[in-house]
């Protein structure tokens, strides 16, 4: 089984409080992912750049779905998946 690392960019979407900390968004987002994901956050220009590695054998579709589901949680209100692939 291959393991893939995904690059996800998360940015403010204007619905949250001004000056919301991307570091706090990172903690919240990572806590909502399924167990076993590796992560490496960076915080360029008020955004959140995450390199995420799901458990071995996770399909692209499952990885994107798991990441996308995190944004349904109210604790991530005000943040959006900025580099989401087109459907």
Image (tube, rainbow, N blue to C red):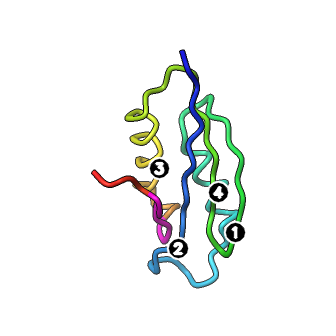
Query: Residue 5's quadrant in the figure?
Result: top right
Residue found farthest to the top? 1
Classed neighbour count for the residue bearing mark 4: other residues with Cα under 10 Å, few (<14), some (14–19), many (≥20): many
Q: Which residue is mark 4?
A: 26
Residue 30 on image: x %, y %: 62, 47
Return the mark for residue 44.
1
Span shown in magenta: 77-83
> In front here: 66 or 7?
7
Q: CA distance from mark 2 to mark 1?
A: 12 Å
Q: Which residue is mark 2?
A: 12
Going from the N terminus, do you reach mark 4 or mark 1 first? 4
Which structural element holds mark 1?
helix
Going from the N terminus, do you reach mark 4 or mark 3 first? 4
Q: CA distance from mark 2 to mark 3?
A: 15 Å
Q: Which residue is mark 3?
A: 70
Q: Are marks 4 and 1 in contact (CB under 8 Å)?
A: no
The residue sitting at 46% across, 36% down in the picture is 63
Residue 7 on image: x %, y %: 57, 49
Mark 2 or mark 3, whichever is nearer to me: 2
Q: CA distance from mark 4 to mark 1?
A: 13 Å
Compared across the picture, whether 43 is left or right of 67 comes to: right
Which structural element holds mark 2?
strand
Q: Are marks 4 and 2 in contact (CB under 8 Å)?
A: no
Does 47 sit above or below residue 75?
below
């Amino acid at each position: 089984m291959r393991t893939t690392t995904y690059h996800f960019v998360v940015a403010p979407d204007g619905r949250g409080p001004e000056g919301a900390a991307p570091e706090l968004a990172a903690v919240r987002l990572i806590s909502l992912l399924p167990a076993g994901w590796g992560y490496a956050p960076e915080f360029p220009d008020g955004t959140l750049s995450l390199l995420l590695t799901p458990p071995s054998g996770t399909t692209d579709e499952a990885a994107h779905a798991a990441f996308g589901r995190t944004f349904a949680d109210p604790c991530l209100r005000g943040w959006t998946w900025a580099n989401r692939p087109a459907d």
